[in-house]
Amino acid sequence: MRLLATPGFWLVVGFAGQGLFTLRFVVQWLASERSGRVVVPASFWWLSILGAVALLSYAISRRDPVIALGQSMGVVVYIRNLMLEKGGGTDPAAPEPAPAIPAPHFDAEPARAGLGR
C-alpha cells in the first residue's frame, strides 16, 4: 500500500495510460494501411479502455475532476463500441444502410472547348 502513496507510481500509471492511448492510434493506422481503407479494429477499443482506466486512476489519485470525468465518459463509449462490434447492439428491424454514393469521375484530359480554334 505504501507504493500507492508515492507520486512516482502515479506518474508511471499516467504515462502508461498516455502510451496506451498513443498505441491505439498506431494500431488503427497500421490496420487501415494493411486493408487499404479506414478500419477500426477491436484492439483499438481495448487499448482505449485500458488507457482510459489508467488515466482515470491517475486523475483520481491527483483529485482532478476534469480529467476523471472525461475519462469515465470515454470508457462508456469504448465499451459500447465493443458491444456494437460484437453484434450485441444491432436492431434486426433497423433499415438497411443506404448504398454508397460513387465518387465523381474526371477525365484525365480536360476538355478544350473553344480554345485555339
Image: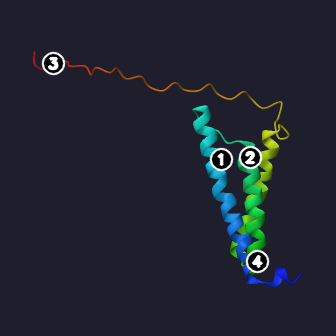
Can see residue 38?
A: no
Tell which circle, 4 or 3, labels the residue nearer the N-terminal end. 4
Distance from disc 2 to disc 4, alpha carbons, whole Å, reads 26 Å
Q: Which corner quadrant holds the C terminus?
A: top left
Front tag of 3 and 1: 1
- Residue 15 image point, x, y percent: 68, 69
Distance Cα–Cα, label 1 vs label 2: 8 Å
Q: Secondary structure at mark 2?
A: helix
Which label was assigned to residue 62? none
Viewer-closest of 105 and 33: 33
Figure label count:
4
Q: Can residue 66 be seen in this snapshot?
A: yes
Q: Which residue is mark 2?
A: 43
- Report the amino acid beneath label 2: Ser
Query: What residue sits 74% from the left and 83% below the top?
Result: 7
Label 2: how many residues lie within 10 Å, few (<14), some (14-19) or many (20+)?
some
Disc 1 crowd, CA 10 A, few/some/many (<14, 14-19, 20+): some
* Residue named by callout 4: 9
Comparing 63 with 112, the one in front is 63
The secondary structure type at the circle numbered 4 is helix
Q: Amino acid under label 4?
A: Phe
Tag 1–tag 2 contact (CB < 8 Å)? yes
The answer to whether 84 is drawn above or below residue 51 in the figure is above
Looking at the rendered image, the quarter that the N terminus falls into is bottom right
The residue to which callout 3 is attached is 114
Residue lying at 75% horizontally and 44% vertically, measured from the top left: 42
Instruction: Identify residue for label 1.
Output: 27
Q: Considering the numbered disc 3 on the image, is that residue within a helix, a strand or a loop?
A: loop
Q: Which quadrant of the figure has residue 48?
A: bottom right
Q: Residue at x 72, y 78 (%)?
A: 64
